[in-house]
Amino acid sequence: MSKLSKPSVAELRPVVHPVGVKDRRSGEHWAGRLYMREISLRWTRHLVNTRITPNQLTHLMVVAGVAAGAALLVPGPVGAIVAALLIQLYLLLDCVDGEVARWRKQTSITGVYLDRVGHYLAEAALLVGFGLRAADVFRVEGASVNWMWAFLGTVAALGAILIKAETDLVDVARSRSGLPAVKEEAAVPRSAKLALARRAAAALKFHRLVGGVEASLVILAVAVADTVRGDLFFTRLGVAVLAAIAVVQTLLHLVSILASSRLR
């Protein structure tokens, strides 16, 4: 195959989707496994021979994610629809940047670092935007803004960041102690009761609601409900629920890590 010709999807797949990529328990989003990895292949084949670098694609991913949070400042269902679409673009670029890197053999520590920072920024921006939306910052002139909702959105954003940080800091702690990266089986709590609680939480998957894709769908659903109702009741309820989930999950996740073998 010529260097300038576009690889086919069949040629790309074994290189950019090596065995285990879609099966990573903590590294692959359900939407990636369900549909986005197939869509991303079609985009990647058009990008591998261009001048755009994997890190530039990661930068675009971050821009799309942060823009989704900003889009929520647009009142009504339009802002929620635009935010949901931007989060899908964010997810697409999250797949494409790694695929281009693997095809070109340009994977790097810098790329991994930028990817993680991008996830922190994008998901935090979305939840902060949700809080500002609930606060109704663009209400009619003279009316007071209820900043409590903006605060709760920020609490949800902080929780989403801390959940990710708790996971990432396991590898930091192990590396500084001279230990290898943690294995998946080490995540199982040593206590049988905690292991059962962890399996129950994993089955319910309520913690995923503070993730970017899931949160954008929740935001879209409550925006539609508020359009029917004619106020912000469901948006405000959604902010309160996501803030509560973020706080509870932050604490439970920390306990789960301390009770497992990940730090041993």
Image: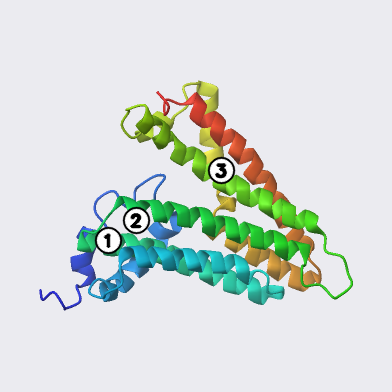
Crowdedness of circle 3 by 10 Å Cα count: few (<14), some, many (20+)? many
Under circle 2, the secondary element is helix
Q: Which one is earlier in the sequence, the residue at label 2 or at label 3?
A: 2
Query: From this viewpoint, which residue is outermost toward the left?
Result: 1
Q: CA distance from mark 3 to mark 1?
A: 28 Å
Q: Which one is earlier in the sequence, the residue at label 3 or at label 1?
A: 1
Could you tell me if residue 28 is visible in this image?
no
Could you tell me if residue 57 is visible in this image?
yes
160 on left or right of 23: right
Q: Which one is earlier in the sequence, the residue at label 1 or at label 2?
A: 1
Q: Kindly indicate whether the residue at mark 1 contacts the one at mark 3 (C-beta within 8 angstroms).
A: no
Q: Kindly indicate whether the residue at mark 2 contacts the one at mark 1 (C-beta within 8 angstroms).
A: yes
Residue shown at the point (37%, 67%) measured from the top left: 57
Residue shown at the point (49%, 67%) measured from the top left: 63
**Residue topped by disc 3:** 162
The C terminus - image quarter = top left
62 on left or right of 56: right
Q: Nearer the viewer, residue 261 or 202?
A: 261
What residue type is disc 1 on?
Ala
**Residue topped by disc 1:** 101
Q: Give residue 111's mark.
A: 2
Dot in front, 1 or 2: 2
Q: Nearer the viewer, residue 217 or 62?
A: 62
What residue type is disc 2 on?
Gly
Please say if 123 is above or below 20. below
Under circle 3, the secondary element is helix
Residue shown at the point (69%, 64%) measured from the top left: 222
Crowdedness of circle 2 by 10 Å Cα count: few (<14), some, many (20+)? many
Rendered location of residue 40, percent (x, y): 35, 68
Rendered location of residue 188, percent (x, y): 44, 29
What residue type is disc 3 on?
Leu
Rendered location of residue 186, percent (x, y): 39, 29
